[in-house]
Image: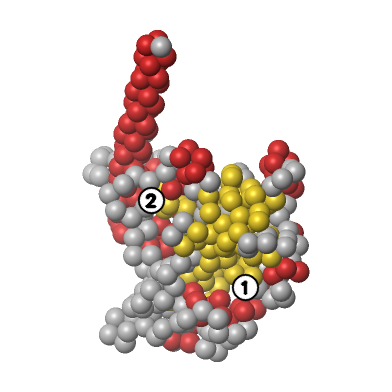
Amino acid sequence: MELGALSLDSLGWSSYFADAFSAYQGEYIPARVASENRGFYLLYTESGGIQGEITGRLRHEAEGRGDLPAVGDWVVVEARFSEGKGLIHAILPRQSKFSRKAAGFTSEEQIVAANINTVFLVTALNRDFNVGRMERYLIMAWESGANPVIVLNKADLCPDISVYLEQLEDIALGVPTIATSCVLGDGLDRLWPYLGKGVTVALLGSSGVGKSSLVNCLLGKDVLLTQAVRSGDDRGRHTTTTRDLILLPAGGMVIDTPGMREMQLWGGEEELDDAFRDIESLAQDCRFSDCRHAGEPGCAVARAIEGGYLDARRLESYRKLQRELAYLAARQDQKAAAIEKSRWKSLSKATRNLYKR
């Protein structure tokens, strides 16, 4: 299907975005961000694809990466179709967003994908499989507002899938889990119900789990570059280096993302509690309401570990993620205070200059 033949509905447009865009009717058009590269954006519109860049005002008013367009965003564009270009004036409110803390020592939000309906959390059935990492992915998926689906890829390399399914039982209650193999074509039919017309799915996972291979299978042809994992440690190179919104022949869309070495949380306590409902439920029976589950008498969580009902690894993972969120909250508070201080300094300077006139 040619891009020019697509309707806005096919790109995921809805009454939610139409209502938000009503204030811009007239000289502007809506467009969806398909990719970003060094400040330039590929935008999908009803009339085809154009190259976009943001206005100076939008860049100036942005307080961080989260205020700039991300792949999957709907944006307000002043289009110049004769030149194949457009200016992005605003970002429409997001229905959902998958965010992480930006890599490094900053406390900035990095939006991996916006306005997604479902997140395919992809892991391979080899040494890449890591329960702790999947716990982290699930927390971030629930925080995003999208629905998580666990995809156990490379099933052809696994003699007994039940071993992995058992490890997911406690951490992914109620989350659909699908085993797939691009080599054999197994399980792919179970992915299609999540990829209807106008629906957007983001694929997330570490390098070498086969995200690009999955996209190629869904496309029915090899479009994305793939590489074999190293035989020594089952690790893959970062074949995908950018985020791209890809249109599928059946009408859905997928956002393929680079394998992420660092996936730090960007969320809150509520999502953490949801992901560890088993521990939260046990904690209700602790003798002390502020029990830290670290040797206090009458600790129901400790009893569950001793009785074999709860894996000690899961409690340690819970504590680690609690510490990470507490650290992030503290850094965000510091950043907010610095921004507020800067604003007051600017306001005071402007006031002094006004009275000097």
Type of the residue with mark 1? Leu
Q: What residue appears at the point 34 percent right and 60 percent down from the top-left corner?
A: 262
Q: Is residue 254 above or below residue 76?
A: below
Query: Pointer 1: residues within 10 angstroms few (<14), some, or many (20+)?
Result: some
Looking at this view, is 164 or 87 the one in front?
87
Q: Is residue 34 left or right of residue 60?
A: right
Q: Secondary structure at mark 2?
A: strand
Q: Residue furthest front?
A: 357
Type of the residue with mark 2? Lys
Looking at this view, is 329 or 18 the one in front?
18
Measured from the top left, where is residue 189 in percent x and y? 65, 78
Disc sitting over residue 101 in the figure: 2
Q: Is residue 249 left or right of residue 332?
A: right
Disc 1 target residue: 191
Q: Is residue 331 above or below residue 14?
A: above
Q: What residue appears at the point 69 percent right and 76 percent down from the top-left corner?
A: 249
Query: Pointer 2: residues within 10 angstroms few (<14), some, or many (20+)?
Result: many
